[in-house]
Amino acid sequence: MHNLGFALDGAWRVLLAGLLLGAGLPVLFALGIRSLAWADAGGVARPAGRTLGYGLFAVVILGVLLGITFIVATGFGKALSFEHIYPTIVPKH
């Protein structure tokens, strides 16, 4: 019975990571596009929409760069550590 609990615990974590990384970044990108469209809609300039759009694009770019860093670090036999405020590449233990 404990094995089923472990399997379900792991399954929801994989599902959450898949939703955040697999669908989350494209959703943020789409919201950035929508906010830029809202910023220029009807000939009225809305600086808040432009700022929100560029902020969302920055989050997407950071997510992609973090994913590439994780893949490259793993390829070199290193690990990505989040012990500090910013991620660092450290040797695997």
Image: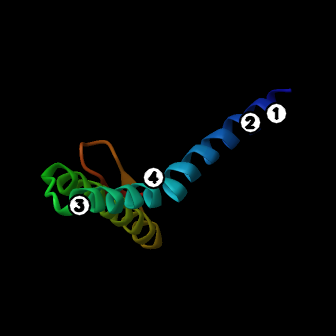
Circle 2: element type = helix
The residue at which mark 2 appears reads as 8
Mark 1 or mark 4, whichever is nearer to me? 1
Mark 2 or mark 4, whichever is nearer to me? 2
Location of residue 49 with respect to 83 vertically, above or below: below
Kind of residue at badge 2:
Leu
Q: Residue at x 38, y 65 (%)?
A: 64
Q: Residue furthest front?
A: 42
Q: Residue 87: x, y in percent? A: 30, 52
Marks 2,1: beta carbons within 8 A = yes
89 with respect to 39 (left or right): right
Mark 1 crowdedness (10 Å alpha carbons): few <14, some 14-19, many ≥20: few
Quarter of the image where one finds residue 12: top right
The residue at which mark 3 appears reads as 42
Q: 26 and 11: which one is in front? A: 26
The residue at which mark 1 appears reads as 4
Kind of residue at badge 1:
Leu
Kind of residue at badge 3:
Gly
